[in-house]
Image (spheres, grey):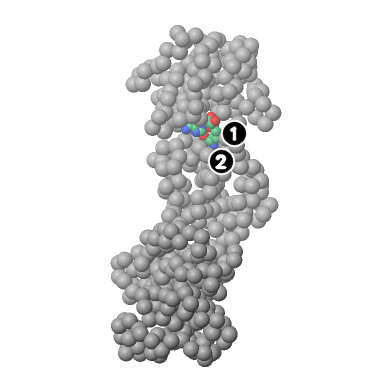
């Protein structure tokens, strides 16, 4: 960085400009926005400059810049549009201790004027050290479009409200308050009622944030259900509505994340069976850090948080950190899958017990009480079982299960692309071979005959 950007207090200063033509007028237009006293030295000033002088907005001396003109000033602009004359002005001004800008002459200048986006009191200065004026213009155009025209007004009213906002504790609380004012509450109030609406909007917003500030941080471990947003519980919806931070698993559908409060920070903490994942310690650290700052954190997990959801790890970590937490249960994949095939998970006379098992655990394919799983009429919902299909098939047959024991594979249960694949132990590996989405294997259950969906004949394909 060769040129260092600073913002100069112009109120107590005089800025001197030498020149009376177009270049001088263009610079003066900018300088007239400041509070500096402006002196223009020009033997033959343009009518605009003469008019500004008549209005008392600039002081005009009708002669060339001379020794003594820069005495006591900080900045001098040489804008005579004559190289030799500009150089003379620069020499004289520097001798009197001023910093000089020669218009359109980067090398000859002590300072340069940046491209400016003006939302006073918010000012954005863009400099490229002369390397790419086109780039500066395009950045400026982009910012002009992005920053609401009312931003300056929002900032001015906001500035006057700073003292009042200090009733909020410093740090996150106060940052959240200002972020909401500038991002949503302020622009909305301005659109609805102009300048006059801003102060009342700030007052109402502060009341709301003061109420919220009395709450301490909390983590809700929330079940998001199998995917269909309509299968969220009312409690889950309310937690999302009130969340400051949402930390979610990879399996959570975007439609569900959209239900989070607009201002909420949404953080993806992906966990994938065999793919990239966020380490559990990092997830714990995030939850605790946000809760300690007073945030209402929603830790959103697919299905039910208590079913293969590492719930205990997280609850233990929260306890150790002294963070209050609660669980909002959700509909687990097994329930959703069984509903999809029109079946009951337990049934009098068939199975009084239901097993939820995982296809693999930390050590690899998971061992089970195979004899119990293989018993006639037994029903088991197998999570994370796709890759273990051959292993499951082998173990179950070895422990006496009939090869034609029904296994129904339900992929993406309750999503628009839910697939239900009726299979048997014999055809199971083929049935799961091409599935890309999460799937539950319902061992011991076939789709109800009366169900309207067509069973896929996978056995024939073997
Ligand atoms: N807590 C979740 C389970 C997380 S483990 C729950 O209660 O459902 C991830 C496994 O859940 C996946 O490998 C898959 O077996 C199952 N699963 C999750 N969502 C599913 C869905 N929509 N359809 C089918 N299986 C799903």
Residue 275: assigned label: 1
In the rendered view, tell whether residue 448 sits above or below residue 122.
above
On screen, residue 262 versus residue 433, left or right, reads left
Residue 130, percent from left and from top: 50, 63
The N terminus - image quarter: bottom right
Residue 247, percent from left and from top: 54, 48
Callout 2: SS = loop
**Which residue is nearer to you in this view: 455 or 262?**
262
Q: Are marks 1 and 2 in contact (CB under 8 Å)?
A: yes
In the rendered view, tell whether residue 74 sits above or below residue 113.
below
| Few, some or many residues within 10 Å of mark 1 (<14, 14–19, 20+) | few
Whether residue 178 is visible to the viewer of this picture, yes or no, is no
Whether residue 53 is visible to the viewer of this picture, yes or no, is yes
In primary-sequence order, the first of circles 1 and 2 is 2
Residue 74, percent from left and from top: 53, 83
| Few, some or many residues within 10 Å of mark 2 (<14, 14–19, 20+) | some
Q: Which residue is mark 2?
A: 270
**Which residue is nearer to you in this view: 88 or 389?**
88
Callout 1: SS = loop
Q: Residue at x 44, y 68 (%)?
A: 116
Q: Residue at x 50, y 75 (%)?
A: 101
């Amino acid at each position: 960085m060769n040129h260092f950007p600073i913002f100069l207090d112009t109120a107590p200063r005089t800025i001197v400009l030498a020149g009376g033509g177009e270049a001088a007028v263009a610079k003066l237009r900018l300088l007239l926005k400041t509070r500096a006293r402006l002196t223009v030295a020009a033997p033959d000033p343009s009518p605009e400059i003469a008019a500004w002088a008549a209005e008392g907005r600039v002081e005009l001396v009708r002669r060339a810049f001379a020794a003594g003109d820069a005495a006591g000033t900080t900045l001098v602009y040489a804008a005579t549009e004559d190289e030799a004359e500009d150089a003379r002005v620069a020499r004289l001004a520097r001798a009197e201790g001023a910093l000089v800008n020669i218009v359109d002459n980067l090398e000859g200048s002590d300072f340069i004027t940046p491209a400016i986006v003006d939302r006073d009191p918010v000012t954005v200065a863009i400099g490229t050290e002369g390397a790419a004026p086109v780039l500066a213009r395009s950045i400026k155009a982009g910012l002009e479009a992005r920053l609401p025209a009312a931003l300056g007004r929002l900032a001015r009213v906001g500035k006057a409200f700073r003292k009042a906002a200090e009733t909020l504790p410093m740090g996150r609380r106060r940052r959240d308050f200002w972020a909401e004012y500038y991002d949503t509450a302020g622009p909305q109030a301005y659109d609805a009622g102009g300048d006059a609406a801003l102060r009342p909007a700030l007052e109402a917003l502060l009341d709301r944030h003061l109420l919220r500030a009395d709450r301490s941080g909390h983590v809700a471990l929330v079940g998001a259900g199998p995917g269909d947003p309509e299968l969220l519980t009312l409690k889950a919806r309310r937690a999302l509505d009130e969340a400051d931070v949402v930390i979610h698993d990879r399996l959570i559908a975007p439609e569900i994340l959209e239900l989070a409060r607009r201002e909420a920070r949404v953080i993806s903490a992906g966990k994938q069976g065999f793919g990239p994942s966020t380490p559990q310690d990092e997830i714990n650290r995030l939850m605790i850090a946000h809760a300690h700052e007073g945030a209402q954190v929603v830790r959103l997990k697919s299905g039910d948080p208590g079913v293969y959801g590492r719930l205990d790890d997280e609850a233990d970590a929260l306890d150790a950190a002294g963070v209050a937490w609660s669980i909002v249960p959700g509909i687990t994949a097994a329930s959703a899958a069984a509903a999809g095939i029109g079946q009951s998970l337990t049934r009098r006379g068939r199975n009084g017990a239901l097993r939820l098992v995982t296809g693999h655990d930390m050590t690899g394919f998971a061992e089970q009480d195979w004899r119990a799983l293989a018993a006639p009429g037994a029903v088991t919902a197998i999570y994370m079982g796709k890759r273990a299909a051959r292993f499951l098939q082998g173990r179950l047959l070895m422990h006496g299960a009939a090869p034609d024991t029904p296994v129904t594979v339900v992929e993406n249960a309750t999503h628009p692309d839910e697939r239900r694949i009726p299979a048997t132990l014999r055809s199971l590996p083929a049935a799961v071979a091409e599935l890309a989405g999460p799937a539950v294997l319902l061992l011991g259950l076939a789709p109800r005959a009366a169900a309207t969906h067509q069973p896929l004949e996978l056995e024939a394909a073997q």
